[in-house]
Image (cartoon, grey):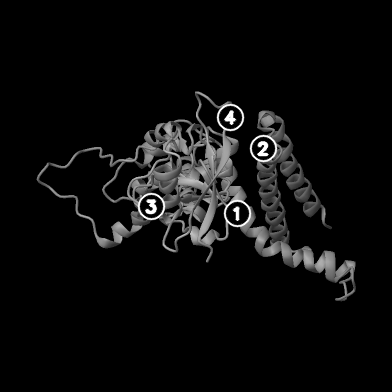
Amino acid sequence: MASRITIEVTRYNPARDPEPRMTSYEVPLHREWVVLDALNCIKDHLDGSLTFRWSCRMGVCGSCGMMINGVPKLACATFLSDYAPGPVRVEPMRHFPILRDLVVDTSDFLMKLARSKPWIIRTVEKPADEEHIQTPAQLEEYRQFSMCINCLLCYAACPIYGLDPQFTGPAAIALAQRYNMDSRDEGASERLDSLSNREGIWGCMFVGECTQVCPKHVDPAGAIQQYKLTAATEWLKAMVLPRGAK
Amino acid sequence: MSKRSNEPFLWLLFSAGGSVSALLMPVHLFLFAIAFPLGWLDPPSDETLLALIRPPLVRVYLFVFCFLSLFHGAHRFRFTLYDGLQIKHLNEIINVLCYGGAVLGTVTAAYLLWRIP
């Protein structure tokens, strides 16, 4: 294995640069190094001004999402040796405004996430000393969708979000579905009101790229399809059943 | 649900149409567009075909087959125009052309099936 590899990194300082540009750096190619190690090596030894988000180094915090050779990936879970002999292109996540270098502005997602109401909604709260009992089978219903770490790789992969920034997007809808499927939750119809529209679930074309890139195997595309079926069933019920019988 | 959207209705037709056409269209296409014209199989005579589609159940089958497949195609074509050609602002014209086309096709199918002697 060659002992060094070239990394091409997007550099952008909005105060100085008219637009983002690519800069190449040469870093050691160790078998156990991931892209995040290479970026830290650049920051420590070559250019301390390189800016990127990271925290846990183990695929849990969801901070280090970036485009690696054009594919949305977590920098901490992508081995350099898989790209030998290089070069490896590292860019900020697609479809988000760049703040600086590899850091993107995710406020659009945070606004949409709140619209999905990703918390347990109860019509009547149980007394504090009473438990909400849930069986393992009930937990299994939503467990997969609860694995989301908000890394936003699915947004960088989703062509619909790229074309139409109004689209709520994969993670926010999958998280809404995570709470819809939770036996303790009673907020499904509230969420349906804010998500059963063109910008919500009906904007999804089931391209499936979100599921392909998800590092936690959440399957957002599957969640949205499930949600569409629920919404369609509710629509049919509202059509067929007399008012108030739902 | 407060804001009623007709999207669930269109999506149900799209899904049903997708399943129906994926299951049945290949057989129909293979027989009538490939096997009979190329002479791989002996084509049935006009009388045999007419006798085959005369029973009301067969007519209903063909009607549902045409109706759902057309609405499936209309929905898919609508979004192909929206996203593929990036002409979402022509929303209303696209809707009228796509679903209007499907309605027209469905009515034509119903009329032709009804008129079978």
- The residue wearing badge 3 is A145
Query: Which mark lies nearer to you, 4 or 1?
Result: 4
- The residue wearing badge 1 is B16
Badge 2: few (under 14), some or many (20 or more) residues near its Cα, within 10 Å?
some
Q: What residue is at 40 percent from the left and 41 percent from the top?
A: A53
Give the secondary structure at mark 4: loop
Give the secondary structure at mark 3: helix
Label annotation for residue A221: none
Cα distance between the residues tagged 4 and 1? 48 Å
Can marks 3 and 4 be said to lie on one chain?
A: yes
Residue A211 relative to residue B68: left or right:
left
Residue A126 relative to residue A219: left or right:
left
The answer to whether mark 1 and mark 2 are in CB contact below 8 A is no
**Residue B47, quarter of picture:** bottom right
Query: Which mark lies nearer to you, 3 or 1?
Result: 3
- The one of A70 and B103 positioned closer to us in this rendering: A70
- The one of A177 and B29 positioned closer to us in this rendering: A177
The percent position of residue A38, horizontal first and vertical second, equals 45, 51
- Mark yes or no: residue A15 visible: yes
Query: Could you tell me which quadrant the C terminus of chain B lies in?
Result: bottom right
Dot 2: chain letter: B
- The residue wearing badge 4 is A19
Cα distance between the residues tagged 3 and 4? 37 Å
What is the residue that sits farthest to the top in this orientation? A15
- Mark yes or no: residue B50 visible: no
Cα distance between the residues tagged 2 and 4? 30 Å
- The residue wearing badge 2 is B82
